[in-house]
Amino acid sequence: MEHYDYLIVGSGLYGATFAYKAKRLGKKVLVIDKRQHLGGNVYCEKIEGINVHKYGAHIFHTNNKMVWDFVNSIVEFNRYTNSPIANFKGELYNLPFNMNTFNRMWPDVHTPAEAQAKIEEQKADAEAAIGGREPQNLEEQAMCLVGKDIFTKLIKEYTEKQWGRDCKDLPAFIIKRLPVRMIFDNNYFNDSYQGIPIGGYNKLIEGLLEGVDCITGCDFFSSKCSPTGEKMNESWRMIADNLVYTGAIDEYFNYSLGKLDWRTVSFRTRVEDTSNYQGNAVVNYTSREVPYTRVIEHKHFEMFGQKVYESPKTVVSEEYSTEYEEGMEPYYPVNDERNNSLAEKYRKLANNEKNVIFGGRLGMYKYYDMSPIIEQVLNLNID
């Protein structure tokens, strides 16, 4: 095997952006990924001519013009605007919480002043119920932020499905704030730029990794791709001078301090024999009576207006949130005291690893949106 300046473990946005930048600086780079495809969780699978977000909805949004210009230099992005809907037992609400939401929740509320008064009244009731002390759990925190009605219909049961725990058993800091907008605006993000790559996220990954040596189906912790017959994590220095690692940080250290907890999601994807199944890309199901957390209709990410009807079929995915078990894909860090403390200990170990860069959601045990990941890499000094 040739020798490289950088071996990159994982071909998601962090790894692919690092590879792009390093190659532009004249570095010799090898990217490996244990999956049979490149792109990590932004990978799209083509079904019925529709780019299906195989690992869940990915909507690019940023206030950073440098990042926006960078990704658009790789592939042009469309004008998709994220405007999810919440379905509570058949009642439909706009997200984020805005004047459309409040009028649906309280039909006699028509003005921002009336909505604000209603919320303040319910917040006061919640604060009185806990005697003016600081909220001790997520339920108390949310009730003190938006009141009983919004919490009951749009937060409580949805959150409990996401985390697999009662809201009273979840720490308050998980919900530090809840966006409340006194305007009729269904745009979920406040960012200046948002969209989806035209042609899907695979186009972005292909552009980032153009001309880069890549091997799929190659597990860093097996001997399958190693030139020495040892596990690659023990012999990678024979392949490269430096390592960029975007896998799970605790696995890199062989769980020496203990295992970190994760939440994961699974999907049931099917083709529907209709042009338009739900009229929106994302519908959240906030009642526990529905076992999944949301339904994604993928064509709405890239097909707008009458184009929706040019395709006679559509693809939808039900998303289920579950506790992580061995062999599943880790998705979300569990941000409680135990895991945050353990992750910080692992990050200290990582800081002492010579010629190794840890990055991404798994490598840092932190939840990141896509734009901050790219921004981190663009701001790195690569020798």
Image (tube, rainbow, N blue to C red):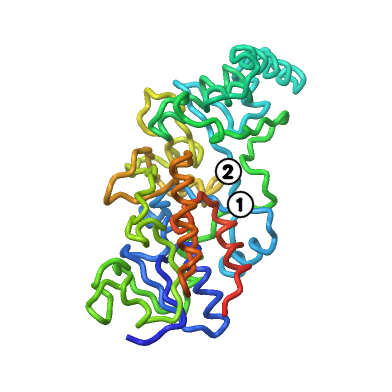
Among the 4 quarters of the image, the one containing residue 140 = top right
User: What is the number of the mark on residue 41?
Assistant: none
77 or 356: which is nearer to us?
356
- Secondary structure, mark 1, is strand
Q: Residue at x 53, y 68 (%)?
A: 17
82 or 256: which is nearer to us?
256
Q: Amino acid at mark 2?
A: Asn
Q: Is residue 56 above or below residue 346?
A: above
Q: Residue at x 64, y 61 (%)?
A: 68
- Give the farthest residue toward the bottom: 2
Q: Residue at x 45, y 46 (%)?
A: 333
Q: Is residue 250 above or below residue 377?
A: above
Q: Badges 2 and 1: C-beta atoms under 8 Å apart?
A: yes
Q: Residue at x 25, y 81 (%)?
A: 228
Q: Quadrant of the N terminus?
A: bottom left
Among the 4 quarters of the image, the one containing residue 184 = top right
Say whether residue 144 is visible: yes
Q: Is residue 212 above or below residue 38?
A: below
Task: Tell me which numbered mark, 2 or 1, is placed earlier along the sequence.
Answer: 1
User: What is the number of the mark on residue 82?
Assistant: 2
**What is the number of callouts on the image?**
2
Q: Is residue 172 above or below residue 323?
A: above
Query: Percent from the top left, x then y, of residue 133?
Result: 63, 20
Residue that carries the numbered disc 1 in the rendered image: 61
